[in-house]
Amino acid sequence: MANRLGESLLIIPGIMVLGAIGLEFTASWLDRTLEPGTLPGFLRLSSEATVQLLSTIAGATITTVGVVFSLLVVSMQLASGQFSPRVLHTFFHERLGKVVVGLLAAVFTYCVLALRALPEDLASSPSAVPHLTVDLAVLLTLVSVGVLVLYLHRIARRQYVGSIIAAITEETLEQVEELCWTGKVLAPEEPPDVSRLGAPLVVSARVSGWVQQVSTTGLLAAVPPGSVLRLETRVGAFLAKGIPLATIWPNPGQEATVSRALHAAVVVGSSRTTRQDVDFGLRQLSDIALRSLSPAVNDPTTAIEVVVRMATILRQLLLIELPPQVRVADNGSVLLRPWDLDHAEYVRHAFEQLRIYAAPHPQVAIALVRSMRMLWEAVDGADRVEAQRELERQLDLALQGCERAGLLPADMEAVREAATHVQDPLRQLGLSEHGPVVH
């Protein structure tokens, strides 16, 4: 729910419009209640100028709202076509754009209500001009102009591919920190033998969609104490209606109540989000790199930037302890999450597609194999055997792909040198017993 509210274009503008309504009612009441000249006035306009000013501001702001929406739609269309459709959520989370739309809509609402509140005998009674209301309208207009200029500056900079890549990287690293905290708090446990627990209860999914978030607390609270609950999906996976969502040993009964609680703990939506989903951040970066390497774009520099950003994420991810797949609650309930990604799977998802399309581009291939080698070195001695094996596999496949791509001998030699150049001189000579030495 929080993610949906964060992406909504209606919440912030709606609140600001309501605030404008309250502000106009308050200003009109003060203009009617206080004696003329009690409050200092910024503008002293005639009755005709007051009506014309409020009308002009209202017309200009509602027109500008349409322009801002057009800019937002065009920027999202460009980002979707040039980078990836999956990066659009970064634009929906842009709060400044919502503030601009809300401020302009609030100024329009304020001016329209101010026109409605003008006395009918305004032309024959100059003292009835609501100076406070007019001054506030002018002030709101000046503020909205300043915020609009700031928004135009921001939206122009956000079209820069480096800004989009940096934003995705930062958002993904935040989720890595969340995984790191969870991995430190929870100790690994051995999975129980469910074959002795009797017939289970299988809860099927009610809707189809992407698993966006999973509440561990909600899952454990949905089953009786002492139960064993196995989640049959993971965050970032697609869940089809009717397939098993969870399996519970022993059968707790009250199927409707348990099913309702389990579905409340698993958030399913029409698209993936970065929340709890580090793999989606890697997927977005990979999509940008793949698009940049396509013949239509042909931008290897962007692909290289993606590679180094992806290596930054993976370095931190591989060095932390991931949350255990077996979690035991205080009441004895056990949660099994066998489908959660491990370190090796994160490496595979990051490089599996990218190495294929990077093979014909020597500079991208060099950056890719150098990053793999750096990651191998970073986790050496950190008990990441499976991750190191996957890095070795990806490194070997990347070199094979470069060979089949028909690189020039000098380029191929540069790629091999980047893949084998490590800090230990013995490994450079191929004397390592366990390092990623490529022959």
Image: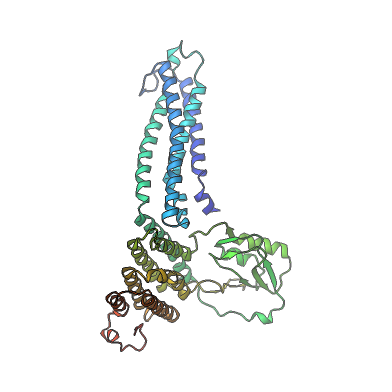
The residue sitting at 46% across, 67% down in the picture is 179
Residue 350 x %, y %: 43, 69
Residue 117 or residue 409, whichever sits in front: 409
Residue 100 x %, y %: 43, 40
Residue 228 x %, y %: 64, 74
Residue most extreme to the top: 124
The reply to whether residue 339 is in sight is yes
Residue 382 x %, y %: 39, 79
The residue sitting at 45% across, 39% down in the picture is 101
Q: Quadrant of the C terminus?
A: bottom left
Number of marks: 0
Residue 124 or residue 30, whichever sits in front: 124
Q: Is residue 60 above or below residue 91?
A: above
The residue sitting at 36% across, 80% down in the picture is 380
The reply to whether residue 130 is in sight is no
The residue sitting at 47% across, 50% down in the picture is 92
Image-quadrant location for residue 409: bottom left
Q: Is residue 91 above or below residue 292?
A: above
Residue 215 or residue 107, whichever sits in front: 107
Image-quadrant location for residue 384: bottom left
